[in-house]
Amino acid sequence: MTLQQPGVYATTAGAAHRAVPAQQAVPVRTAARPVPVVRDLRERAGRGPRTLAFATGDTVVVSGLPGSGKSTLIRRTASAVAHRIDSQDVRERWEAAMPRLLPYALYRPLVRVAHYAGLWRALRSGDGVVVHDCGTQTWVRRWLARDARRRGVALHLVLLDVTADVARAGQQERGRGVSGYAFARHRRAVGRLVRDAEAGRLPVGCASAVLLDRDAAGALKVIDFPAPAPAGP
């Protein structure tokens, strides 16, 4: 089954997507603006899409709680034609190069600078980009939305919706957790994103959102940016 909209489609062998609450009528003065589309792929017992395909050059932001599986999903599904931008990858490279006894807090600012510099270069490449997002950095999504608008491409959200217990278990599994205060802040930010998506409301500049639970994320095999088909004679 193929579900398609401008710039994104999902291929699945399962049933139709669950409906999203209808949005309010668009005022006449803004009727020309594209209406964001939300695809809810949760609660399908692993019968979700195997592929999420976006237009060439689009940016996909993968957001969710710490430990929800964002990095795992990106590493497993981002196609070879996409730039994979994950702050965890940058951190691991720096940790491997630094003395073992040097606290991460001392060079965390450098890791962040390296991460955002890599994101800036990826956006300038014109290729598809898949970005790890913790949910609390609203300024990053605003930056990505402005960049997408400037380049004439689209920004999309992929939201991992898991319980706090599942996320904490994921943190324990990877051997790296966050403080109770930081986790509560993440829960508020991600919860707001999920609730807004369920109501058909997306951050300004986002063309679409896909809601995934653990089963749907496990069923997903590829996040792709296929080249457009050649025009006919």
Image: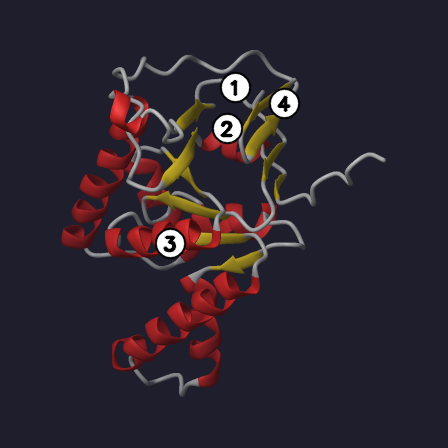
State the residue lying farthest toward the right.
Answer: 233
- Binning the other alpha carbons within 10 Å of mark 3 as few (below 14), some (14 to 19) or many (20 upward) gives many
State the residue lying farthest toward the bottom.
Answer: 99
The residue singled out by tag 2 in the image is 215
- Marked residue nearer the N-terminal end (4 or 3): 4
State the residue lying farthest toward the left.
Answer: 181
Judged from the image, the secondary structure of the residue bearing numbered disc 1 is: loop
Mark 2 and mark 1 residues within 8 Å of each other at the beta carbon:
yes
Judged from the image, the secondary structure of the residue bearing numbered disc 3 is: helix
Residue 173 appears in the rendering:
no
Closer to viewer: mark 4 or mark 3 = 3
- Binning the other alpha carbons within 10 Å of mark 4 as few (below 14), some (14 to 19) or many (20 upward) gives some
- Label 4 and label 2: CA atoms lie apart by 14 Å
Name the residue type under label 2.
Asp
Name the residue type under label 1.
Ala
- Label 4 and label 1: CA atoms lie apart by 13 Å
- Label 4 and label 3: CA atoms lie apart by 28 Å
The residue singled out by tag 3 in the image is 144
- Binning the other alpha carbons within 10 Å of mark 1 as few (below 14), some (14 to 19) or many (20 upward) gives few
Q: Quadrant of the C terminus?
A: top right
Q: Which residue is pictured at 37% across the width and 47% down the height?
A: 67
Res 16 → quadrant: top right
Left or right: where does residue 102 sit relative to residue 189? right
